Image: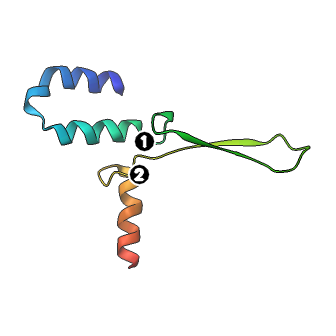
Amino acid sequence: MLQCQRYYLNKYRETLRTVVIENVTKMLACSTVTFGSKDYRYSQVNCTHQKYIHQTCKSRFCSSCGIKATERWIRK
C-alpha cells in the first residue's frame, strides 16, 4: 500500500493539497507503531502475558477512526 502511495505522490504531488497528503498518510499509518504503542502486562509476578496496543490516527477521514467518531456523535 505504501508503495502505491509513494508512486501516486511522486506523480501527482503538485495537484494535491497538503491536507489531503497529510490525512492519507495518517490513515495508512493508523494502528501501527508510527503513532506509538502501549504495552500492557499483568501485575501478577508469575504471569508473563503481554499485549501491545498501537495508537490510532484519530482522523475523521480514516475508515476506522472516523466511524467511531461518527457513532459517538450520533449517540449524543
Left-right relation of 2 to 21: right
Calculate the distance from the C-alpha at mark 2 to the C-alpha at mark 1. 8 Å
31 versus 14 height, above or below = below
Q: Residue at x 51, y 34 (%)?
A: 33
As drawn, the residue found furthest toward the bottom would be 76
Q: How many residues crowd mark 1 within 10 Å: few (<14), some (14–19), many (20+)?
A: many
x%, y% of residue 58? 39, 52
Residue found 41% across the figure and 70% down from its top? 72
Q: Looking at the picture, how far across and down is residue 35, in whole percent? A: 46, 39
Q: Residue furthest left?
A: 15
Percent of width and height locating residue 43: 82, 51
Q: Residues within 10 Å of mark 2 (few under 14, many from 20)?
A: some
Q: Secondary structure at mark 1?
A: loop
Residues marked 2 and 1 touching at CB (< 8 Å): yes
Q: Residue at x 20, y 25 (%)?
A: 9
Residue on which the image places disc 2? 64
The kind of residue tagged 2 is Ser
Give the side of residue 55 with respect to residue 17, left or right. right
Residue identifier under label 1: 30
Query: Percent from the top left, x then y, of residue 51?
Result: 69, 43
Could you tell me which secondary element the residue under label 2 belongs to? helix
Q: How many marks?
A: 2
Quarter in which the N terminus is drawn: top left
The amino acid type, in three-letter code, at marker 1 is Cys
Quadrant of image for the C terminus: bottom left
In this view, the residue farthest toward the right is 46
Comes first in the chain, label 2 or label 1: 1
Left or right? Give the position of 67 relative to 40. Answer: left
